[in-house]
Amino acid sequence: MRDYIQKSVHTENYPSFNALWHLQVMGVRDANHQPNGWSAQRTGRTRVAMIDTSVAPSHPNLQGVIKSDLAIDLYSSRLGVFPYLDEDKLGHLDLNSNTSVAENLPGCKALLVELNDRLTHGSLASVDGVQPMTSEAFSGHGTAIAGLIGARPAVSKKHNDDVMAKQHDDLPLPYVGVDPECEIVPISTNFDPEPRGLIIALLYAELIRADVIVMPRIIPDPIREMAELNGHEHNGKPLAEVLAPVTYVDDDIALWKELTQLMVNISQARPIVCAAGNSNEEFGIYPANLASDDNGIISVGAVNAKGFISGYSSANNITVHAPSDDSEVFDRSEIRLDERRDGYNPEGIPTQNANDKFSSFDIISTDVPGKFGYSGSAFGNEMDNGIMREFGSYYCRFGGTSAASALIAGFLALGKTSGELADTADGIASKTWLLSKCKTLSDQDLQFRFPVWTNCVAPDFPDS
């Protein structure tokens, strides 16, 4: 993959770096970008359920990766709309209908019955006229997550620079994710504080027998948040009442409580990988903070390309850390500034600036082609009869614990694809296997676990 170069107008250029450095530091790819000691051994494809935004399936590197006929959108309809599946095919889906994850959870059980009916008798629970909310305008985050998990190298057609020639050139796009042999099922949901859509998303991942579930986002946790405020008052009113953004009815309160237990139940059968948050949360964001030794929930923090915990990522109570970008820090605990940043002024900066810990390396991932996404394009309709006008918008700078959690989801998928992790491994067994692949690294007085595919080799961080 061509080196990715960042340039600053008024300062020296940022160092160039390999766009796939994160795969090499995790030991998944060697220096020549070839599989590092693994090959696909599984008969069927490992299935990753991605609960996030929608994805741009037109991206060349995601062709054959997105399991389009199972993709579901829960943003536009309570029981889901299928963007790419004919309604009359719903009754033929292979479902894990006898799952017991909703036992003793009456609200979840009722939603499971409804969802099963929707999926097995589509004509009886159709949503005529409802259009899925899967426009590429909404798909930036999901497209980047999907690329990190399972993108495949591709060759695409591009307009020749000589417009008069009216010819097309083959353009190699050698980008690759952690497990290019897996399949990804996008489960797109809205971001409103509403528990039913999240419950249905998790139930759907259970019904389609996902091998790995990834939730690279925060979701509301109003019950525990309000419980922490009990006993405190402001101007004579309970603080929980003053700070509550909305008023929850009893049914919603019950469902929020059940959602927590449902995630724990599902994680017993299949691992749930969660981003730990980008604001130094001590115990991680919800649901990452549900991770414990007796469930299959995995909280993921971030490490920069120098091997230090990223400036925004917590170090405590995190299951594993994975590669990502970095951020500047200037507080009582640490000063970590980017001295190459345009406009950086050293005047007044204490001498203990830990600039040696800051890394300018980003994570590079797939982006929505065209004007949407993170990179953007001058062309409103980027593709012209399937021919690329340009490829700059096909990739983007990405980061945060979202990127790190995507890499861990891909790492777990690769475990099953390669045969190192048994097909039958449940959530806890998968988590145990992941931890067995980890090295214990240090960041000053902090220790954290970092997964390395070839366990005999220490990670070689490229910016250190």
Image: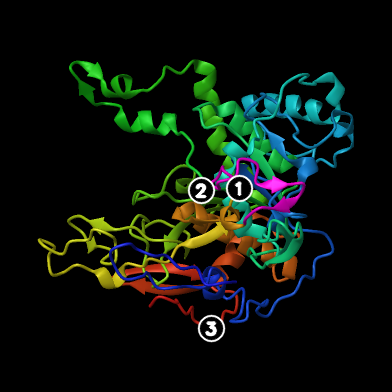
Residue found at the far front of this picture: 164
Q: Residues within 10 Å of mark 2 (few under 14, many from 20)?
A: many
Marks 1 and 3, how far apart at CA: 35 Å
What's the residue at 25%, 62% (across, down)?
A: 337
Task: State if disc 1 and disc 2 touch (CB < 8 Å).
Answer: yes
Marks 2 and 3, how far apart at CA: 35 Å
Q: Name the side, left or right, on which 129 lies relative to 318.
A: right
Q: Residues within 10 Å of mark 3 (few under 14, many from 20)?
A: few
Q: Quadrant of the C terminus?
A: bottom left
Residue 3 visible: yes
N-term mark: 2 or 1:
1
Disc 1 target residue: 368
Q: Is residue 86 magenta?
A: no
Q: Residues within 10 Å of mark 1 (few under 14, many from 20)?
A: many
Disc 2 target residue: 374
**SS under mark 1:** loop
Residue type (three-letter) at the residue carrying disc 2:
Tyr
Residue numbers of the magenta segment? 369-390
In front: 364, or 314?
364
Q: Name the side, left or right, on which 240 lies relative to 156.
A: left
The quarter of the displayed image where residue 196 is located:
top right
Disc 3 target residue: 457
Residue 272 visible: no
In front: 204, or 338?
338
Helix, strand or loop: magenta stretch? loop
